[in-house]
Image (tube, rainbow, N blue to C red):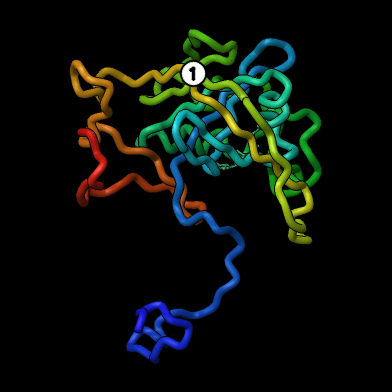
């Protein structure tokens, strides 16, 4: 008999899980700082963590009312800057800000404020990009210059308490920059003993722990 058959026999695990209703489902994803071009040619920074990669694509979830989403969908380009764990205080300095003026009502209610210059607020250093117009963030060890190739509206009904909605933005990486200290010399591989992402786990910041092992497809 298959071990995953519907009528599985009661096991010692039966009472280990309880049903909960968490306010978010952020089990743990890397923080990315999206830099996008404002209409006046300056660069906005949007902290985010709803991103995943497959092949040369990074797919992003951005709330409908964020400046980063508006800029990315208008300009069709952005940079994904990946910070290391030590940079979390700078990200938290950006957290209660938006490049939207006026501040959307639901954000104003919980203490967000408008900031025109997110580099100034965070203390991050702007760095010119090579293929896109938004600036990179010099302190971030991995930076992906990317083009927006598609945007999708989410399916299903929105929960009543989250009426602002979001967009699924599909981007294609067109240039990858990695700090020389995290690249294995002479290769295109990231040295995973020298790079670790900043993770966003149920609205807390974490670094990663020790290397537990590699998958069979790992190249380095
Ligand atoms: C660590 C962190 C992760 C976040 N993840 C996301 C996300 O995945 N998608 C999103 O739309 N907003 C996310 N936010 C909220 C945005 O940063 C927030 O909406 C901000 O105002 C966006 O700035 P902007 O309006 O200037 O683009 C996150 C915030 C923080 C601090």
| Residue 172: percent from left, percent from top | 54, 26
Image label count: 1
Q: Nearer the viewer, residue 139 or 20?
A: 20
- The residue lying at 52 percent from left, 54 percent from top is 26
Place residue 41 in its image quadrant. Answer: top right
Ligand 1 image-quadrant field: top right
Q: Is 170 rendered above or below residue 71?
A: below
Residue at the far front in the pictured view: 1
Residue at the far bottom in the pictured view: 10
- The residue lying at 63 percent from left, 26 percent from top is 149
| Residue 175: percent from left, percent from top | 45, 17
Q: Is 131 rendered above or below residue 214?
A: above
Q: Nearer the viewer, residue 1 or 50?
A: 1
Compared across the picture, whether 40 is left or right of 35 comes to: right
Q: Give the secondary structure at mark 1.
A: strand
Q: Nearer the viewer, residue 194 or 109?
A: 194
| Residue 6: percent from left, percent from top | 48, 83
Mark 1 highlights which residue?
A: 174
User: Looking at the rendering, in which quadrant would you find the N terminus?
Assistant: bottom left
Compared across the picture, whether 141 is left or right of 76 comes to: left
User: Looking at the rendering, in which quadrant would you find the C terminus?
Assistant: top left
| Residue 152: percent from left, percent from top | 70, 39
- The residue lying at 62 percent from left, 25 percent from top is 148
């Amino acid at each position: 008999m298959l071990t995953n058959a519907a009528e599985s026999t009661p096991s010692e695990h039966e009472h280990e899980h309880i049903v909960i209703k968490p306010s978010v489902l952020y089990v743990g994803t890397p923080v990315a700082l999206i830099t996008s071009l404002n209409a006046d040619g300056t660069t906005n920074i949007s902290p985010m963590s709803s991103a995943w990669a497959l092949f040369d694509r990074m797919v992003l979830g951005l709330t409908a009312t964020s400046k980063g989403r508006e800029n990315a969908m208008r300009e069709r380009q952005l940079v994904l800057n990946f910070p290391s764990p030590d940079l979390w205080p700078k990200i938290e300095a950006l957290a209660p800000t938006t490049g939207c003026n006026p501040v959307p009502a639901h954000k104003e209610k919980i203490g967000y404020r408008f900031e025109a210059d997110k580099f100034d607020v965070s203390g991050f250093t702007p760095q010119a990009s090579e293929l896109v117009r938004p600036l990179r963030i010099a302190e971030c060890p991995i930076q992906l210059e990317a083009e927006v190739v598609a945007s999708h509206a989410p399916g299903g009904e929105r929960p009543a308490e989250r009426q602002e909605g979001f967009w699924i933005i599909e981007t294609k990486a067109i240039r990858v920059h990695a700090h020389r200290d995290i690249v294995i010399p002479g290769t295109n591989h990231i040295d995973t003993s020298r790079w670790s992402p900043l993770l966003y786990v149920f609205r807390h910041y974490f670094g990663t722990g020790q290397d537990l092992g590699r998958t069979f497809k790992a190249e380095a």
